[in-house]
């Protein structure tokens, strides 16, 4: 971790002479960034009275405001508390080609917790782990993360507070809390050091800048941003574009064996289905309402072969729910807006509030299925994604969200029959296209990818439920029954 250097008092005249060139370089950086395949995430944090706000305001004045946004995180709103802690940070990430400045960053909230007792310190450490993981996700996806810590000694901090307090125009900026921070300087410095060490990782390092002299501080921050940007841009240009894999080899053969062992010859007559359907729809309605009464939201994930019946299963399931309380999110090819964000961004934004329901028709597992097989991401990206996806779901379930994951499995013969039926039926022809037939030719490769997905992302809190789907009635009833049982089990924990 880069340490602050000694104090360098910079004459005003020299400072003003250097500023124009620096401002020009920053704007040129923004021009180059517009065509770069990554965002810039700048965190300006530091000790109290170190000038964090001054630096953020100055950068906003020096940069073109059309290409930068500024965020500061205060006490969570009710809407934010009803979702996992990282939700509000995912919401305000910049797209590729743009820059965001975070005053205090997500680290400020961790430090505001001001832990004292062993349980509080344990929560603090876990929060830091979560923040480091978050930054690791963004960095691995190509984001440039620049984190600066503006450091003041206890004496320099006291002198700064006294100077502000003695001037009638700035006295309002000093609060009793600021003086308390100065009295408690040593302990808070230890917590800040612990935070920086825990979140100082490759791709997201901390750079400590001495903030005693504001002019030197300002130039140091801007200069460091430019240095990191130029190095990052050069490194990204050297990366080869992703390409489809030549051969699909299973990472965990046990998952493929589990998939192939699923008995698909299940049957259920229409009479038997109708006799049982309403009972399980009623139970599902009661289960979802019970979850809502306890402030528990539910996330359904539906994956499966083309024509496996995901849409029909979702329609039957939602017939038991109040339309005001659920959303169905169909996941298809990313939109232009979604393409310029981290691949998890479009899923985080739809996480439901407490007591609500979100149903994903296809999901984040596209990363290890279609993106893996079609070469839409690099091998390192999809291999890393298994851990990223399980951590994402762990954040959901850790917040109390009930996650229900279904894979609808179909025989190749039944899929062919359904494809042909769609082509021959006027009102179903929109459901079949050349892409479906092309995917079918990669059946064996998809089986391997699905097997790896099952083996590497099946967790007790968010297990995979495999549903034989050759018989639609059997599959729909199985989904209703399994959903009821898993919701009930989650509420009993």
Image (cartoon, helix red, strand yellow):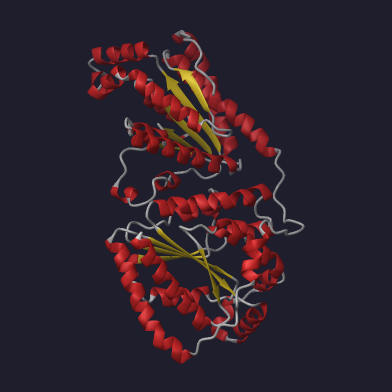
Q: Which corner quadrant of the image does residue 1 belong to?
A: top right
Q: Residue at x 68, y 60 (%)?
A: 373
Residue 473: x and y in percent read: 49, 83
Q: In the displayed image of the protein, which residue is found farthest to the right?
A: 246
User: Along the horizontal axis of the image, is 474 left or right of 234?
Assistant: left
Question: Which quarter of the picture shows residue 334?
Answer: bottom right
Q: Is residue 356 visible?
A: no
| Residue 419, percent from left and from top | 63, 80
Above-or-below relation of 424 to 223: below
Q: Toward the viewer: 464 or 52?
A: 464
Vertical side of 341 occupied by 493: above or below: below
Residue 393: x, y in percent? Answer: 47, 54
Q: Is residue 421 left or right of residue 81?
A: right
Left or right of 12? Residue 371 is right
Relative to 436, residue 168 above or below: above
Give me the residue at 68% from left, 63% from top. Answer: 448
Residue in view at x 38 percent, y 20 percent: 50
């Amino acid at each position: 971790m880069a340490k602050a250097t000694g104090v360098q008092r910079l004459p005003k005249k020299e400072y003003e002479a250097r500023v124009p060139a620096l401002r020009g370089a920053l704007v040129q950086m923004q021009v180059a960034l517009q065509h770069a395949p990554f965002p810039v995430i700048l965190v300006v944090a530091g000790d109290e009275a170190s000038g964090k706000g001054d630096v953020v305001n100055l950068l906003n004045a020096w940069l073109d405001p059309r290409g930068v946004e500024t965020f500061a995180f205060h006490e969570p709103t009710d809407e934010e508390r009803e979702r996992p802690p990282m939700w509000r940070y995912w919401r305000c990430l910049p797209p590729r080609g743009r820059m965001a400045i975070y005053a205090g960053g997500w680290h400020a909230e961790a430090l505001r917790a001001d832990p004292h007792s062993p349980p509080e310190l344990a929560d603090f450490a876990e929060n830091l782990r979560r923040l480091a993981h978050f930054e690791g996700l963004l960095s691995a996806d190509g984001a440039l993360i620049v984190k600066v810590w503006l450091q003041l000694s206890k004496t320099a901090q006291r002198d700064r507070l006294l100077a502000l307090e003695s001037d009638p125009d700035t006295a309002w900026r000093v609060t009793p809390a600021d003086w308390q921070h100065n009295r408690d300087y040593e302990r808070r410095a230890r917590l800040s050091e612990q935070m920086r060490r825990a979140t100082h990782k490759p791709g997201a390092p901390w750079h400590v800048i001495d903030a005693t002299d504001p002019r030197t501080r300002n130039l140091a921050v801007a200069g460091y941003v430019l240095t990191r940007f130029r190095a990052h841009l050069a490194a990204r240009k050297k990366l080869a574009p992703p390409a489809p894999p030549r051969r699909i080899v299973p990472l965990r053969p046990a998952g493929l064996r589990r998939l192939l062992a699923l008995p698909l010859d299940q049957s259920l007559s229409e009479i038997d289905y109708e006799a049982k359907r309403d009972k399980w729809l009623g139970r599902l309605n009661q289960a979802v309402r019970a979850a809502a009464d306890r402030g528990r939201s539910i996330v359904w994930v539906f994956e499966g072969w083309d024509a496996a019946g995901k849409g029909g299963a979702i329609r039957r399931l939602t017939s038991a729910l109040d339309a005001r309380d659920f959303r169905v999110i169909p996941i298809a090819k990313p939109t232009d807006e979604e393409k310029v964000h981290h691949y998890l961004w479009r899923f985080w934004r739809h996480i439901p509030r407490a007591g609500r329901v979100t149903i994903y028709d296809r999901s984040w597992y596209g990363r290890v299925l279609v993106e893996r097989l079609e070469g839409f991401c690099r091998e390192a990206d999809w291999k890393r994604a298994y851990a990223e996806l399980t951590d994402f779901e762990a954040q959901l379930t850790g917040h109390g969200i009930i996650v229900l994951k279904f894979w609808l499995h179909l025989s190749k013969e039944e899929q062919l029959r359904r494809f042909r039926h769609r082509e021959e039926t006027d009102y179903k022809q929109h459901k079949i296209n050349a892409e479906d037939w092309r995917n079918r030719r990669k059946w064996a490769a998809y089986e391997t990818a699905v097997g790896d997905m099952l083996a590497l992302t099946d967790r007790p809190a968010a297990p995979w439920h495999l549903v034989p789907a050759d018989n639609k009635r059997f599959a729909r009833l199985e989904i209703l029954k399994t959903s009821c049982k898993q919701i009930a089990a989650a509420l009993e924990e």
